[in-house]
Amino acid sequence: MIRVIQVGLGGMGNAWLRVVQASDEVIYAGFVEVDPEIAQRQAATYALDPGHIFPTLEEALSSVEADGVIVVTPPRFHRDISIAALEAGVAVLSEKPLADTMEAARDVVRVSTDTGVLHMVAQNYRYTRVARTVRQALLGRRLGAVSNVAIEFFRGPHFGGFREQMPYPLVVDMAIHHFDLLRFFLGSDPSTVYGKSWNPPWSWFAGDASASLVLSFARDLHVAYNGSWCSLGRETSWNAHWRFDCERGTLVVRDDVITVEQGGQEPAVVPLMPMPRVGQAYLLHEFHDAVTTGMQPATTCQDNVKSLQMVFDSIRSFETGEPVTFGG
């Protein structure tokens, strides 16, 4: 059993409160919440000890013993909170994105590497039955090499708060999931990124809520990504719709149903892999195992910074109108 401090109780903090309270591997040592009203409301809702809710992480770390910190704050605070925990020798499980800028992300990676303290990013979309089944199907020999990928993502969520004020909300807060899945599915990083973003006139976001991108990978593999967070019509799954054209057939993911078509035959539905834990529950379990056994989780900051690099390379392309060399 490990003890954790959760930083941030509102918004996405609700999901983590439910997951941790249901866990038989992780318990709470304390909480950090800067808004007294949110702290009071969540203490009542989740039966939290108000005496263990602190206004800063520094106060929490000096008051309780913890093995880990779960960071559930707006991205602009991820760097400072993560580094404070790492420098105190406490492992971190942070909501995505890793940080709000590449400079901040590299700072977190540097401190985690220098201290040897774990920093893990909560890329929960990797840990679904759909994602695991797609990866297994692509790794098998049935379909052969992938030549091109098409991704469609269209939804119209009304979040309020910081997401609706971001300059590039779709790419920074949502496409990071799909970019991370691309790396997971293909087992490689892109070579170039080229795209355009815009904000439809009816959008309720302050920044660009729509984007189209072409991402090129090794072996002449290309990915087309089209998405919007202010779609008023038929919505896709949060996982997006995917099409993988391969040398011996096509794999399609639509509304979280996976089908394979080969040689003109009727599409065959691929059964989803069983998983005892999914999403945040899987991540929490993996964090527990990493803290207690020293195992290396898949989404350490040292690896996940590459998914974030795809986001900021996309933004550079939006702003320059030119293709961007990955990490260049």
Image: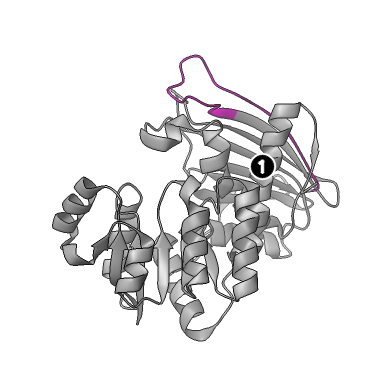
Q: Is residue 206 magenta?
A: yes
Q: Is residue 119 left or right of residue 325?
A: left
State whether residue 213 is above or below residue 18: above
- Can the viewer see residue 127? no
Q: How far across and how far down the image is residue 231, in percent?
A: 47, 26
The span shown in magenta is 191-210
- Residue plotted at (50% across, 65% down): 273
- Residue plotted at (53% across, 65% down): 120
The residue that mark 1 highlights is 312
Magenta highlight: main SS = loop
Q: How many marks?
A: 1
State whether residue 110 is above or below residue 292: above
Which residue is at the front of the view, 79 or 307? 79
State whether residue 238 is above or below residue 121: above
Question: Which residue in the rendered view is the most extreme toward the bottom?
Answer: 293
- Which type of secondary structure does the marked residue at label 1 adopt? helix
Q: Is residue 252 left or right of residue 75?
A: right
- Can the viewer see residue 21? yes
**Crowdedness near tag 1: few (<14), some (14–19) or many (≥20) residues, C-alpha within 10 Å:** many
Q: Is residue 217 left or right of residue 200?
A: right
